[in-house]
Amino acid sequence: MSHSDYGELWKDYLSKVNKTRTSFANINQICENTILSMMLIYSEIFESVKTSLPNYQAFIAFLYKRNITYLQSSHLLACIGFIDPSSNLNRTIYETILRCYLFITEPKEADEYSQAIRAEKEKSYDRKKGVKYIREKLYSPKTCKEHKEFYEQLCILAHPSIKGVAEDYPEHRPDRIKDNLSIILHLMYGNIQMMSECFFGLLNSQATKIIIPSMERIATTLEYVPLFEPDEDSYSSRIKLKRGNFREVL
């Protein structure tokens, strides 16, 4: 490939992006708006933080911000038509949201995680406290099963399995692109809700003015409320934001 060919490749990327934005104008615009909203929410929350944070809040702040970058990247890849790479990012985002809810409901888990980082027990911690552990700890059997099925679908595209080989870029597959944009919106809702839950007491009026319409637009666009919050009895009572009640409690 000559140097000039790379220019043609970028032209094709931009052509695919424009095609996606035209074909799925509404859902794509909600994705774009939500990316900006998540950045503004982060800024508003940390305008209020004047002291050092406990481990669980510090971790969640970093992970929320990283999720924004991953969601932005996943959205861009999906718009070009790189569905499988986008899905791999979605899997990481999903895992991160679940781990953050573990830290919210059990702050001591964040302390344990802090002690494990870069220590001899880090690998054993990762094996013991993976997605399965978190899922079974935080969710009722019915919800746990639903999360397991969702996660399994995300994992198909993350492993070197023939089941994960599908038509991708340079094809422009509208059905797969639309499905993936919906998953990205689903994860954006979870990211915003998780961050809002963690810093509930620090949300100023400007932050809530961004959070409420952002979550409302996503739920309206998807025509359902994504459920990431723990619903196991002992944890559900500790959660303020659940089952789409953000309008009432924020």
Image: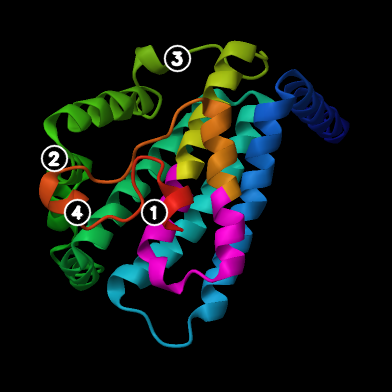
Q: Which residues are magenta?
A: 190-212
Residue 208: image x %, image y %? 55, 61
Residue 248 is marked as none
* Residue under numbered circle 2: 136
Q: Quadrant of residue 209?
A: bottom right
Q: Secondary structure at mark 3?
A: loop
Earlier along the polypeptide chain: callout 2 or callout 1?
A: 2
Q: Residue furthest bottom?
A: 51
- Vertical placement of residue 132 versus 15, above or below: below
Q: CA distance from mark 2 to mark 1?
A: 18 Å
Q: Residue at x 52, y 27 (%)?
A: 222
Nearer the observer, disc 4 or disc 1?
A: 4
Nearer the observer, disc 2 or disc 3?
A: 2
Magenta stretch: dominant secondary structure: helix
Using a 10 Å C-alpha cutoff, classify the residue at mark 3 as few (fewer than 14 neighbours), some (14 to 19) or many (20 or more).
few
Earlier along the polypeptide chain: callout 1 or callout 3?
A: 3
* Residue under numbered circle 4: 237
* Residue under numbered circle 1: 194
Earlier along the polypeptide chain: callout 2 or callout 4?
A: 2
Q: Residue at x 16, y 69 (%)?
A: 108
Q: Secondary structure at mark 4?
A: loop
Q: Residue at x 82, y 24 (%)?
A: 15
- Vertical placement of residue 217 versus 240, above or below: above
